[in-house]
Amino acid sequence: MANSSETVGFIGLGIMGLPMARNVLNAGFPLVAYNRTSSKVDTLAEAGAERGESPADVAARSTVIVTCVTASQDVEDVVVGTEGVPGILDGVRPGSVVVDMSTISPDVTRGLAARLSARGVTMVDAPVSGGEQGAIGGTLSIMCGGEAEALERVRPVLKAMGRTITHCGPSGAGQTVKLCNQIAVVLNNLAMAEALVFCQRSGVDPSVMLEAIASGAAGSWQISNLGPRVVARDFAPGFKVGLQQKDLRLALEAADRLDLPLAGTSLVHQLFRAVEHREGGDIGTQALVQALEVLTGVEVRSDRQPQL
Ligand code: NAP
């Protein structure tokens, strides 16, 4: 399928970015890809993507530039440039659109949008939910902030990566909604962990409990997807604790500026800190249960997988 009205530049080919870029290429868009560690471009280049030499080079050769890097400072680095690595602002052509799909600060987003706007470039913030599986399957939920007109222009590109694309409001609103998503995610995670520890201490098989409650009022993505991993003692990451903590820090900083108490989110942030001390930041977020296990002396475990 040829789809050549836009040339897409893609910067950041990590766990999320690589499959997202592959889906854009598979949808028929010409693609120019750049990654700081250049070997990660290889498989895309074999599939027909062009290699970019730097964020500036990608921007000069594209009309829609997607970024999917780690944190606020990293997006600033690829937009503004660093010593020896010119940024998007050094190469971008007026009339282009920058779509940042990383999870970063709403305030930093608005600052970068203003700098790009001064160069005749529009920015859409478009963080995602759905994890690596959603990125591979092209089924991500994408939360967008920025001008409606710019979003409509890039919507065909986003449709190659996601199923639900929501315009949340002006610049930064997509990042704000992503932080709301993270608040709800971690509190569901804590709810699951507390139910599992209580169940285990009470002498009931936690797999039975998960089967009984997964499709009722307590059902959640965490219960269905992370619960089975906990009872199997599988803490391999789908989403890493370190990245989750970055997002909670963003939510708590934003709440601080709003003079808003986020009691539950603060608690989970501290509990994850205990997990990080023991296990490091690369463990999966289902390891939240380990913080409660240390407090209670209970280990959640089942001999069989729940049938969910
Ligand atoms: P990742 O696997 O750690 O990949 C990060 C990517 O960003 C790598 O390509 C890395 O390049 C690049 N990068 C980081 N800092 C950079 C810099 N200063 N300059 C240039 N490139 C830089 O992370 P990920 O899981 O794909 O996550 C990407 C974003 O999506 C994050 O904001 C994350 O919070 C968000 N997110 C992740 C998930 C998930 O389940 N993983 C879900 C939703 C949202 P190198 O290869 O050179 O290190």
Image: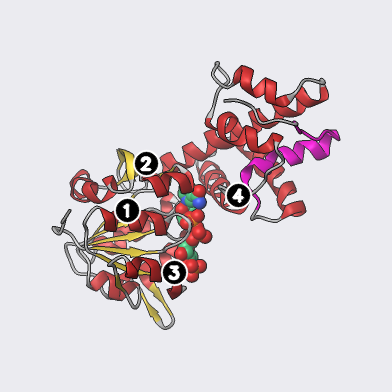
- Rendered position, 246 above or below 39: above
Q: According to the image, label 4 marks what residue? A: 237
- Disc nearer the start of the sequence (2/4): 2
Instruction: Please give the name of the residue rendered at 75% of the width and 31% of the height, measured from the top-left corner.
Output: 303
Q: Is mark 3 within 8 Å of ligand 1?
A: yes
200 left or right, relative to 185 = right
User: For the residue carrying disc 3, how many other residues have a C-alpha within 10 Å: few (<14), some (14-19), or many (20+)?
Assistant: some
119 left or right, relative to 5 = right
Name the residue type under label 4. Pro
Q: Contact, CB < 8 Å: mark 3 with mark 4?
A: no
135 left or right, relative to 250 = left
The numbered dot on residue 40 is 3
Tell me where residue 65 appears, x and y as whole percent. 28, 62
- Residue 173 seen in this snapshot: no
User: For the residue carrying disc 1, how many other residues have a C-alpha within 10 Å: few (<14), some (14-19), or many (20+)?
Assistant: many
Q: Which residues are magenta?
A: 283-302
Whole-Å distance between the Cαs marked 2 and 3? 22 Å
* Of the pair 41 and 105, the residue shown nearer to us: 41
Tell me where residue 152 appears, x and y as whole percent. 19, 45
- Disc nearer the start of the sequence (1/4): 1
Name the residue type under label 3. Lys
Q: According to the image, label 2 marks what residue? A: 139
Q: What secondary structure characterizes most of the magenta part?
A: helix
Q: According to the image, label 1 marks what residue? A: 23
- Seen as rendered, the residue at the extreme left is 5
Instruction: Please give the name of the residue rendered at 56% of the width and 47% of the height, measured from the top-left corner.
Output: 238
Whole-Å distance between the Cαs marked 2 and 4? 19 Å
Whole-Å distance between the Cαs marked 1 and 4? 23 Å
- Disc nearer the start of the sequence (3/4): 3
* Of the pair 19 and 147, the residue shown nearer to us: 19
